[in-house]
Image (cartoon, rainbow, N blue to C red):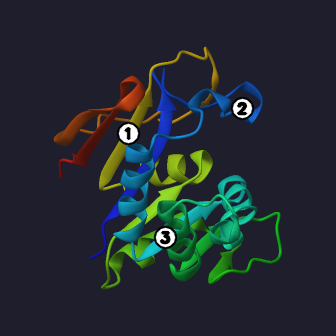
Amino acid sequence: MRKLIYGMNLTLDGYIAAAGDDIGWSGPPSEELFQRWLEHEQANSLSLYGRKLWQAMSSYWPTGDEKPDATPAEIAFARNWRDTPKVVFSSTIDKVDWNTRLVTGDAIAEITRLKAEDGGPMSIGGATLAAAAMRAGLIDEYVIVTHPVLVGGGTPFFTALDGWVNLNLLETGTLPGGVTLTRYETRR
C-alpha cells in the first residue's frame, strides 16, 4: 500500500494562501527550504494535484531548468517535476501534459485505488483536493512548513473534520527566516 503525503507552506494562522489566492507572504524560499522541498518531491513516485496547483506548477516548472539564473536545485526540481508521473483532478480542464493524466470523476475513489497499489509514496497538493482526502481519512503524513506571518484569512491548510485525527511527531526543526518544518504521521 502506498503512503499519501500532504505538504505545503502555510502561515502561522494556518493558511496556504491569503485572500485572493495571494502567496506573496512566503517570499522566495531559502536555499535550505528549497532543498527540503526538492528532497520531498524526489522521494515521491506520483504527484496528485488539484486544478489550481496544477496550473501554477505547470506554468513554470516544465521549463524551469532553462531559466538563465536557475540554481542547481531549481534545475533538479524542474527535471524531477517533468519526470514524476502526475494525476490532476479537475472537472473544468480538458487537457494536461508533462507526464500527467487527468481524472474528471470521483477523486476519492481514484486516490483510494492508487493508495492500494504497490509503489512509492504519493504527494497530494491543492487545498480542495487535499481537504477531500483528509475528510476521507486517506492522508498518512503531513509536512507543514510554517512561515512567521499572520494573514487573517484565505485558503486553510486544514479542513473541518467530522472527528479527531491523532498524529505522531516525526520531525521538527527551524529553517532560515524563522520558518519551521514539522512532519507528522497519522496514528492508525
Taking the spot 36% from the left edge, 52% from the top edge, the residue there is: 36
- Left or right: 184 with respect to 168? right
Name the N-terminal-most of marks 3 and 2.
2
Name the N-terminal-most of marks 1 and 2.
2
Q: Mark 2: which secondary structure? A: loop
Residue position for label 3: 76
Residue type highlighted by circle 1: Ile
Residue type highlighted by circle 3: Ala
Taking the spot 43% from the left edge, 77% from the top edge, the residue there is: 114
Name the N-terminal-most of marks 3 and 1.
3
Rendered location of residue 169, percent (x, y): 17, 39
**Image: 71 above or below 16:** below
Q: Mark 3: which secondary structure? A: helix
- Residue 163 placement: quadrant: top left
- Left or right: 11 with respect to 175? right
One can see residue 10 in this view: yes
Q: Around disc 2, counting alpha carbons within 10 Å, would you say few (fewer than 14), some (14 to 19), or many (20 or more)?
A: few
Residue position for label 1: 144
CA–CA distance in space, label 1 to label 2? 18 Å
Please name whichever residue, 68 or 144, is drawn nearer the observer in this view of the structure: 68
Q: Mark 1: which secondary structure? A: strand
Q: Residue furthest front?
A: 68
The answer to the question of whether label 1 and label 2 lie on touching residues, with beta carbons closer than 8 A, is no
CA–CA distance in space, label 3 to label 1? 22 Å
The answer to the question of whether label 3 and label 2 lie on touching residues, with beta carbons closer than 8 A, is no
Please name whichever residue, 106 or 78, is drawn nearer the observer in this view of the structure: 78
Residue position for label 2: 22
Q: Around disc 1, counting alpha carbons within 10 Å, would you say few (fewer than 14), some (14 to 19), or many (20 or more)?
A: many
- Residue 155 placement: quadrant: top right
Mark 3 against mark 1, which lies toward the viewer?
3
Please name whichever residue, 156 or 149, is drawn nearer the observer in this view of the structure: 149
Quadrant of image for the N terminus:
bottom left
